[in-house]
Image (spheres, rainbow, N blue to C red):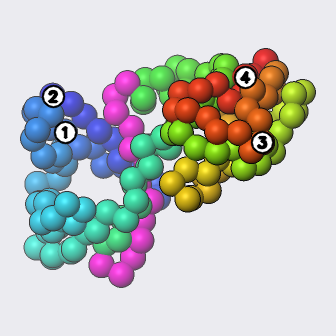
Amino acid sequence: MAKLHATVNTKEITLERATPAASWTPVGDTNLDLVRTGPSSFSLVRNGKSHSVLVLKEDVENQTVRLRIGAHTYTVELQDDRSRLLQTLGLDKATKKVSEIKAPMPGMVLNILVKAGDSVKKNDPVLVLEAMKMENVIKAPGDAMIATVHAEKGKAVEKGQLLISFA
């Protein structure tokens, strides 16, 4: 039985499901019924009162979901049992060593925003890549120091080609 812990503001709700294909159901709250009505919409009945729920955005990296329930919008933090254990042990703060950025798609390097020796934080823009007539800002995947910039402004790159190495 898989469990998921959802926190809305300070209220926590524990959900469980028997199989990966089964629906999540709240633990211990028999006055709650949740039914999927579309790809990102649900019908929620709690204490005899019906609510429409719309999933606005799922952020897998930050383990959050933005929901609209009626006229109100909520950010829900989600944790599975493993994430909760890592947080309890203080291991959720462990930083992953970033070693390189590779081209996510073929394209043309329009601009390089960093140089060797620069320090970057997670999500800092490091390079602009044009692909299919769209500009894509490539961001740092974590806090790091730039070791080498392998990309050259105005040059084409292939998918998977090394763009930046980190120290």
Alpha-carbon span between mark 1 and mark 3: 50 Å
Alpha-carbon span between mark 4 and mark 3: 16 Å
Residue 93 shows in this picture: no
Residue 83 on image: x %, y %: 42, 29
Label 4 residue SS: strand
Mark 2 and 3 residues: CB-CB less than 8 Å, in contact? no
Residue located at (25% from left, 69% from top) = 53
Magenta range: 70-82
Reply above or below: 112 against 161.
below
Provide the major secondary structure of the magenta segment: strand
Residue 129 on image: x %, y %: 64, 47
Residue located at (11% from left, 60% from top) = 35
Give the residue number, with chain letter if any, for mark 3: 153
Reply above or below: 18 against 76.
above
Point out which mark residue 165 bears: 4
Indicate the amino acid at tag 1: Glu
Nearer mark to the viewer, of 1 and 3: 3
Mark 2 and 1 residues: CB-CB less than 8 Å, in contact? yes
Give the residue number, with chain letter if any, for mark 1: 16
Q: Earlier in the sequence, mark 2 or mark 3?
A: 2
Residue 98 on image: x %, y %: 66, 23
Mark 4 and 2 residues: CB-CB less than 8 Å, in contact? no
Q: Earlier in the sequence, mark 1 or mark 3?
A: 1
Nearer mark to the viewer, of 1 and 4: 4
Label 3 residue SS: loop
Q: Residue 9 versus residue 110: which sits nearer the camera?
A: 110
Label 1 residue SS: strand
Mark 1 and 4 residues: CB-CB less than 8 Å, in contact? no
